[in-house]
Image (spheres, helix red, strand yellow):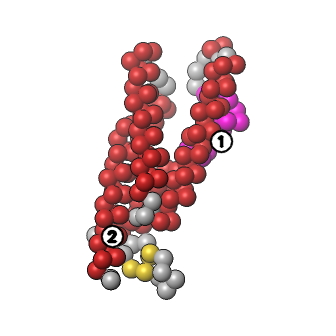
Amino acid sequence: MMAQTDHADGEPQPTGSRHALQILLGVLAAVPLASGLYGMLAGAAAWPFAQDEVTATLDGEFRFTNAFWFAAGLVVFWAIPRVERRTGVLRAALGTVFLGGLARLLAIAVHGVPHPVFLGALFIELVGAPVLLVWQARVAAASRKSDREHQ
């Protein structure tokens, strides 16, 4: 892993694994931003299930939940510039995504296999989020080590 160096303004310069993590987080954070906004505006009727199954209660809960999904994307985007220092907020956001995956597993146990789009989401939630958390922890540790070496 490459050492992290500083810009003249004291901000960390993206190098190696840190920069790759920032790019991937940016790409992945675009998903909850776009789909959360879409879900808030279009409601449950826009998603892949029978239209006659959409009630006012389901639609309201769907829009409400998508507001949190949208906010999670904003939080991750906020963390990206200082990804090595935003451990707590990333743990909270990605841990919530993981918890959502567990809830999705419960839904599968109760109602069966969902639309394939949601199976892909399940993989990202249960596998991708923990991988990103481990990766961010390593980037944070490398940053702390680099900071100690430069003191």
Q: Could you tell me which quadrant the N terminus lies in?
A: bottom left
Q: Is residue 109 magenta?
A: no
Q: Secondary structure at mark 1?
A: helix
Tell me the tag on residue 137. Answer: none
* Above-or-below relation of 47 to 69: above
Q: Secondary structure at mark 2?
A: helix
Specify the segment rendered in magenta.
Answer: 32-47
Q: Which residue is more in the foreground, 103 or 14?
A: 103
Q: Is residue 17 left or right of residue 78?
A: left
| In front: label 2 or label 1 | 2
Q: Quadrant of residue 37?
A: top right
| Residue in view at x 44 percent, y 21 percent | 107
Crowd around label 1: few <14 · some 14–19 · many ≥20 (10 Å): some
| Residue under numbered circle 2 | 144
Q: Residue at x 58, y 51 (%)?
A: 74
Badge 2 crowding class, 10 Å Cα cut-off, few under 14, some 14 to 19, many 20 or more, is: some
Q: Relative to 102, is 22 above or below? A: below
Q: Quadrant of residue 3?
A: bottom left
Image vertical order of residue 102 relative to residue 72, above or below: above
Q: Which residue lies most toward the bottom here?
A: 8
Determine the main secondary structure of the stretch shown in magenta.
helix
Q: Label 2 vs label 1: CA separation?
A: 36 Å
Position of residue 147 relative to residue 75, above or below, is below
The residue carrying mark 1 is 37
